[in-house]
Amino acid sequence: MKHRKLYSVLAALILASMILVACQPAAQPTEVLTEEPAVTTEEPMVTEEPVMTEAPTEAVATEAPTEAATEPPVTTEGGTLVFAQSADAGTLDPAVETSANSLQPIYHIYEGFTDFEPGTTTPTPRLATDWEASEDGLEWTFFLREGVTFHDGTPFNADAVVFNFERWWDTENPYNLGADQFIYWGYMFQGFKGDENSVLAGIEKVDDMTVKLILSRPNASLLNTLAMENFRFASPTAVQEQGEDYATAEGMAVGTGAFMVEEWVKEDHLTVVRYEDYWGDPPTLERLVFRVIPDPNAAFLALQGGEIDMITEWASPGPDQLAQAEADANLQVLYNPAFNVGYLGLNHSKEWLQNINVRLAISHAIDKEGMVAALNPDNAEVATQFQPPSLWGYNESIEDYPYDPELASEYLQMAIDEGVQIPDPVVFYVMPISRLYFPQPQQLGELIQAQLAEIGLNTEIQSPAWPDPYLSDIQEDGTKHDIFLLGWGGDNGDPDNFLCVFFCGADTQFNYSEVGTGAPPDEEIAQLLRDAVAETDFETRRAMYEEANQLIHDRVLSVPLQHITAPTLARANVQGYVPSPVREVLTYLVKE
């Protein structure tokens, strides 16, 4: 295996974006490292206590993790695990999906260049066995794993990699569905082929098992980004043959992962089965069934009765059910780190919400402390920023807007005196199903509705179906609603994956643009965030995110509400689950 030639700047950048999660008892919240880990020439590892150090200043060459460090033990126990989700997948195409209900099965079907070590956001080799970076950070060469095949029997090689990147990046590619559909590409690479801000400048096939990515500027989170579900490789043959049906219930998702699709009955269940020609150690389970149970009460009863084996953190039950689960010897409550944010979104395409006094009025009208105490007293904390406190770049000096209905009313009257026309009613989108960041969205929506009514804002709650049209209305339309509940779970352990996702302009939810790509609600903040992910000095980069958080707060672009330590629920006989800040991995679980 070749050694990675990572120069000091890139070593600092990459390792600075990693988060190590400490090993803790299953029923307790897991902590996330708040600083960059030390650069070391040894294999990265998860320790009992995270080590926090300063960024290195001298050149350090790091070894790629050995295969033994990243591969689980060989075992073939078999059996079926039924995993409940609150909604069905939209599609199983990694490039177009943003919802966890889709990304959960996608993780088990597809693979990318890198993955994360269990329980962390430390990148580790997957379909790339090794990589090299140029000294300026603009060229990355990836060496591909040999002997890998897609589920349709076609080979994984450089041609397949180039096909996927061209499909993701080039909106003129016949298999690209449009910038408004390949949302995560816009989030993480800040534009498409030909766009001024695009991070990717080109991709080249070096030989059959080697490819090169050419960047327009350094990108500190690249290896972490490439571990995300959205940048995993689909069979070019399957994409070409299926066309628009690719990865839908009418077509077939085809990756290289440990599981392949067996059956998909929309709105009921998706079954994936062990891929017998998988290049790595075979899954311990023979089948995974992703079962759709929209009602969290029904899902909990099914878990108690043994009808299902697990409930995803994205369908978290309320506090009463959590207490029941913790008292039940037949169940487990497995807490994942609070690596998320739930927020009240303000649609800046609505003229009345472009007024700072209106936004200040809304901020002061909401009782966050009371909200958390009423709905999630044991596993949530009030949010002041759009990234969790556990992630570096969080600004400790920010003081939240206090709950003050009288002051909120004064701000609203100031806006009215300035000529702002307040709609009546204000259309308030509240999701119809439980989400990781909002386990009880309807109750939360009603609390916020009552608090806004106190200052004279009359809202009408609407709950379109999830994921569509709820998400498409918010992310692609922007005309049907004024304010909305939504949230975000971190994907790659870097503040860029929170702040630039929201405020660099790829996401349309805060300021819809008629051309189908979001105009940033604040261009100064957007440029600061673009510069931050390209910065080569860690401490400078940290300070840039702290500054961005302060500006987002001061300009009240929207209202962060809470971070939640979300539980994955399981039957007591399910063993081997590793709590993670970014994903629920089921591949090597065992049912005893």
Image: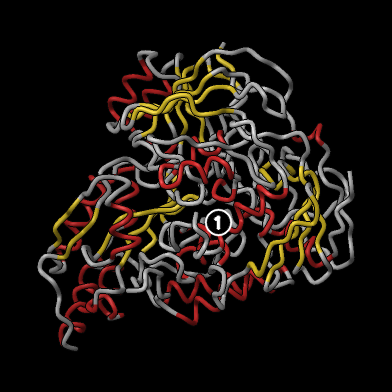
In the picture of the structure, the residue carrying the numbered disc 1 is 167
Between 371 and 233, which is closer to the camera in this rendering? 233
Residue lying at 79% horizontally and 54% vertically, measured from the top left: 38
Foreground residue, 580 or 523?
Answer: 523
Q: Observer-nearest residue: 309 or 559?
A: 309
- At 64% from the left and 21% from the top, the residue drawn is 276
Which quadrant does the C terminus fall into?
A: top right
Q: Quadrant of the N terminus?
A: top right
Q: Position of residue 400 (x, y in %)?
A: 41, 67
State the count of labels.
Answer: 1
Which quarter of the figure has residue 139?
bottom right
> In the image, what residue occupies the spot 67% across and 27% down?
278
Q: Is residue 220 left or right of residue 59?
A: left
> In the shown orientation, is residue 31 left or right of residue 80?
right
Q: How is the image coloured?
A: secondary structure
In this view, the residue farthest toward the front is 241
Q: Relative to 308, is 110 on the left or the right?
A: right
Up/down of 214 relative to 80, above or below: below
Q: Is residue 483 visible?
A: yes
Q: Amino acid at mark 1?
A: Arg
Q: Is residue 417 above or below residue 447?
A: below
User: How far from the left and from the top, in percent, is residue 72?
Assistant: 72, 27
Secondary structure found at label 1: helix
Give the farthest residue toward the bottom.
418
- Residue 89 at x, y = what percent? 39, 39
Residue 220: name its quadrant.
bottom right
Q: Residue at x 54, y 43 (%)?
A: 337
- Residue 590 position, x and y percent, is 59, 17
**Can residue 547 be seen?**
no
Depth check, front residue: 327 or 131? 131
Within-10-Å neighbours for mark 1: few <14, some 14–19, many 20+:
many
Outermost residue toward the left in this view: 424
